[in-house]
Amino acid sequence: MTALLSTRGLSLSFGGVVAAEAIDFDLAQGERLAVVGQNGAGKTTFINICTGYLKPSGGHVFFDGHEVTGHSPRSITRRGVGRSFQLPQVFTEHTVRECLMLAASSVKQRHGFWLPLAEAVDAEEVDATLELLQLAPRANDLAGALPEGQRKLLDVAMALVLRPKLMIMDEPTSGVSSDEKHQLMAVLMRALDERKVTSIFVEHDIDIVRRYATRLCAWIAGRIAADGAPEEVLRDPVVIKNVIGE
Ligand SMILES: Nc1ncnc2c1ncn2[C@@H]1O[C@H](COP(=O)(O)OP(=O)(O)OP(=O)(O)O)[C@@H](O)[C@H]1O
Ligand SMILES: [Mg+2]
């Protein structure tokens, strides 16, 4: 089976810091991959390269049968990769519904020109996505007024409204209380399942990883140090010593 997302020899350093070191990676359709690793291990760097926010100094990224190395974020979004951010990137001065409309219109051009919002946006799709992420009751509230958990959901909703094939989420539960984390993940995972979206999520909470991931990659110093079934990776002595910290 061909991979949905692949990288070969992906490399990037910042000064003397090696953030990605010759990473070879394959993700199949339908996987739900968790990524763990200590602060600075290179998790966000990997996501940024795969989604076009950073250009690698070496190596290749392939998505859905096409090479996308160094392509712009917008072009990679158009191919079907959605992402959310460690710090949610929402339009705080706009309402929740407006945020989804702006996101939905952000990739719609005709002959190189942007379309009027009403033409670019499918209102039913916006409403369905709000329902899916349980944000409908907040549709007319300012995004800036949302509690962190709902702001995280909105960040994902702004990507899901574009109907991605792959959703990459950078710490979807960070900044949310441990009580709320499971509820948040349950909503996210149900939404992704319902739309049959393959997913990658960065997570520090091992309980969440155990519960929701079908596969786990542990990052150490710009490399994937362990990759496999979550229970297997979590038993790996290198992962216990360098990632979980016991
Ligand atoms: N734009 C940048 N300029 C300089 N150094 C950077 C840049 N982005 C990342 N780095 C460095 O690259 C390394 C990897 O950073 P990255 O943000 O990918 O880590 P991370 O695994 O996502 O960590 P965290 O868990 O804290 O989010 C770190 O040492 C970081 O300081
Ligand atoms: Mg990070």
Image (cartoon, grey):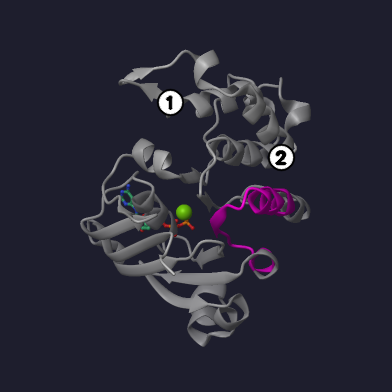
Q: Quadrant of the N terminus?
A: bottom left
Q: Is residue 92 visible?
A: no
From the top left corner, tell me how far across and down residue 169 is, in percent. Answer: 54, 51
From the top left corner, tell me how far across and down residue 203 is, in percent. Answer: 58, 60
The answer to if 202 sits in the magenta stretch is yes
**Residue at disc 2, secondary structure:** helix
Q: Quadrant of ligand 1?
A: bottom left
Q: Residue at x 65, y 25 (%)?
A: 96
Q: Quadrant of residue 122?
A: top right
Label 2 is placed on what type of residue? Leu
- 221 horizontally vs 99: left or right: left
In space, the residues marked 1 and 2 are separated at their CA atoms by: 23 Å
**Residue at disc 1, secondary structure:** loop
Residues shaded magenta: 185-209
Q: Which residue position is annotated with label 2?
A: 132
Q: Which residue position is annotated with label 1?
A: 108
- 178 horizontally vs 165: left or right: right
From the top left corner, tell me how far across and down residue 119 is, in percent. Answer: 51, 16
